[in-house]
Image (cartoon, helix red, strand yellow):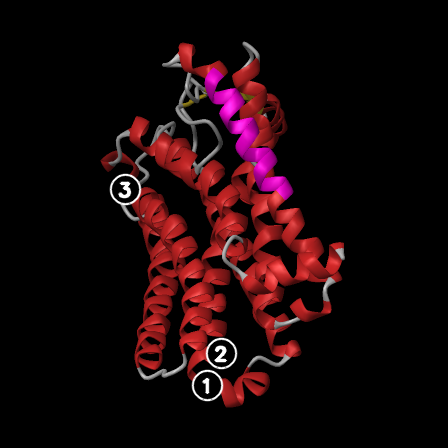
């Protein structure tokens, strides 16, 4: 077969996403639960984006980055959940080769972008609490836009590298991906050759996109904690705990599962455990982010009252 024939055969091939097929009795329950979480994600994140746009009091760096995070979560869940719902509902659990490539690229790109964006948001909180007199200069609108663009560009560039290396690896005869979406560790298990170079690349770039942002986030919160201890105002303390506590909770919900999945070799991960960890950060976490940021947030409650009244 010539090269064109091989390319055509590859592009026409389909992957089988095994997902949760080991537990067929759970599939209907999972379909209902995931659909509810997906609707919560869509409604909650759209609410934040629209409210931040409509209310002039929320035209601040914090809500600019929060709107970016909400849009990111909308795209992130949409890149994998609709396919998962289709696979849970019907007997067909297939995805085309091109569909798998596209899904892998966007899931990885959006996940990498979120790591960087959460780091940028922690810097914004650091500037607000530790450098309040210089905050408007430090977080100038043009600089905020530059930070947001840098987050998106770095995430999509990182994904392009991994996607190329993953789909360059030759696959064995069967195309059964033991996961509910196309993910790098799951696809590397289908390879016919030694994938240590891919695993090493994945661990190095994951360290850059997971560990470095996490270290910088924790450093920011160390400085914030010191500033909080020096505060005398009770109102100031409550506001700091409200905004910073919400962000720290979102960071924990996103980074802990990411470390469990990406900072160990695919061979060292229990596949069933990996599926449920991935389920948590792709389905549950994006639906919780709007709740965490809005439930105890006076600015958002005030914006809702102004919008309604």
Alpha carbon distance from label 3 to label 1: 41 Å
Which circle, 3 or 2, is nearer the viewer? 2
Between residue 3 and residue 118, name the one nearer to us.
118
Which circle, 3 or 1, is nearer the viewer? 1
Residue 214 visible here: yes
Compared with 186, 28 (above or below) is above
Compared with 259, 118 (above or below) is below
Q: Mark 2 points at which residue?
A: 128
In terms of secondary structure, where does tag 3 sit? loop
The residue at the point 45 percent across, 57 percent down is: 115
Q: Name the residue under label 1.
A: 131
Q: Mark 3 points at which residue?
A: 265
Mark 3 or 1, nearer chain start? 1
Please give the range of residues in magenta.
29-43
Between residue 58 and residue 223, name the one nearer to us.
58
Alpha carbon distance from label 3 to label 2: 39 Å
């Amino acid at each position: 077969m010539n090269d064109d024939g091989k390319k055509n055969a590859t592009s026409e091939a389909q992957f089988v996403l095994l997902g949760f097929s080991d537990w067929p009795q759970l599939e209907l329950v999972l379909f209902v639960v995931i659909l509810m979480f997906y609707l919560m994600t869509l409604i909650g994140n759209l609410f934040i984006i629209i409210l931040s746009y409509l209310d002039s009091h929320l035209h601040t760096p914090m809500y600019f980055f929060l709107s970016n995070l909400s849009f990111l979560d909308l795209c992130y869940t949409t890149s994998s959940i609709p396919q998962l719902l289709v696979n849970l509902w019907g007997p067909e659990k297939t995805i085309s080769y091109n569909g798998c490539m596209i899904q892998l690229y966007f899931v990885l790109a959006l996940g990498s972008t979120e790591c960087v964006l959460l780091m940028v948001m922690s810097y914004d909180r650091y500037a607000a609490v530790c450098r309040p007199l210089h905050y408007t200069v430090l977080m100038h609108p043009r600089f905020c836009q530059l930070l947001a663009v840098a987050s998106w560009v770095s995430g999509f560039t990182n994904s392009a590298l991994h996607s190329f290396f993953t789909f360059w690896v030759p696959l064995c005869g069967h195309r059964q991906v033991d996961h509910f979406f196309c993910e790098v560790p799951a696809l590397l298990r289908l390879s016919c050759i030694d994938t240590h170079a891919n695993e090493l690349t994945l661990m190095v770039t994951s360290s850059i996109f997971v560990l470095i942002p996490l270290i910088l986030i924790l450093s920011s919160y160390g400085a914030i904690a010191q500033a909080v201890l020096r505060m005398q105002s009770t109102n100031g303390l409550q506001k700091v705990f409200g905004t910073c506590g919400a962000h720290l909770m979102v960071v924990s919900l996103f980074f802990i599962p990411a470390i469990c999945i990406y900072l160990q070799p695919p061979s060292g991960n229990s596949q069933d455990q990996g599926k449920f960890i991935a389920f948590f950060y792709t389905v549950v976490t994006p639906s919780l982010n709007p709740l965490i940021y809005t439930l105890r947030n006076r600015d958002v409650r005030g914006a809702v009252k102004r919008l309604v009244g």
